[in-house]
Amino acid sequence: MKPSTCAAALMAAALSLTEAPGASAAVPSVNMEAVVKAAQIDPRRPGHTPTPGAKAGVLLVERALRDRHLLDGRWVDGYFGTTTVTAYAKYQRSLGYTGLMANGLPGRTSLAELGAGRFKVAHAIGPGARVPAGGVVIDTRTRSMLAEAKRLFGRDLVLDQGSYNPGGDPTSAGTHDGGGVVDVSVKGMNAATRVAAARALRRAGFAAWVRSPRQGAWPWHIHAVAISDTDLSTQAQHQVGDYYLGQNGLADRGPDDGPKVTIRTWEESQALLRGRTA
């Protein structure tokens, strides 16, 4: 080897040694939006097919749960099914969380703590603070979503029932116990207008259906669940999963009877809107 070539090789080796520590310190990212979506859909999905775009992040979460002895290694498969939801809820309780804070959906704080030294959290989401809205309570994320739905619909949306209302309406089967769930009044609306309102809610990131008295012991209304609200009750999480799978969100898990739209979360719809206006 010529002297100049040898010197260049030694310099390259030295540079690789100085760069190695930084490279080894890099940690992967968990896309929280994708993981939370998977935690709603996968438990309702037949088989063990992971939610598209979520597998890599779910695997990181499952490995961290496994290493905390909360999840058996055979369930580390990138599928955020019932077993992983249960393990995550157990992890949340180990942090001292109770109630909605231990609902099995990854929250921003618990996910960051789980990932300490292992992964960082990207695309973090959260429900925001609880706020009053027309005599009921919702969270700020839901409030923003309703404002967008109102804009798309072109008129006000009046709420019959809000969120964080455990036991408030026994016909709701627990869906309103957590955040992100509202019932919208359809008083004065004809059939076409009811469908238009449900479509606007869906476009804003809700799983929304027009409910009729023949479906249950309730009056006409629109039931809307904010997809990926991390305060969702277990029952509301299941409704979101069913919505993604083309079902009606009711106990019979019948076919979806609402207007067809491209399903997007609030964050996805806002990203699309920003892209259009950029």
Image (tube, grey):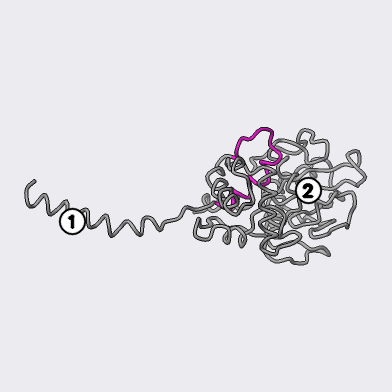
Q: Residues within 10 Å of mark 1 (few under 14, many from 20)?
A: few
Report if the CB atoms under discs 1 and 2 are less than 8 Å apart.
no
Residue stretch rendered in magenta on the structure: 31-51
Q: Which residue is mark 1?
A: 11
Which of pointers 1 and 2 lies earlier in the amino acid sequence?
1
Number of other residues with Cα within 10 Å of mark 2, as a class: few under 14, some 14 to 19, many 20 or more: some
* Count of residue discs: 2
In the displayed structure image, the side of residue 46 where residue 119 appears, left or right: left
Q: Position of residue 21 (x, y in %)?
A: 34, 59
Which-is-in-front pick, marks 1 and 2?
A: 1
Q: Quadrant of residue 249?
A: top right
Residue 235, numbered label = 2
Callout 2 amino acid:
Gln
User: Mark 1 and mark 2: span between their CA atoms?
Assistant: 61 Å
The relative height of residue 144 versus residue 200 in the rendered view (above or below) is below
Q: Residue flagged by tag 1: what amino acid is it? A: Met
Magenta stretch: dominant secondary structure: helix
Asked if residue 218 is among those painted magenta in the image, a careful observer would answer no
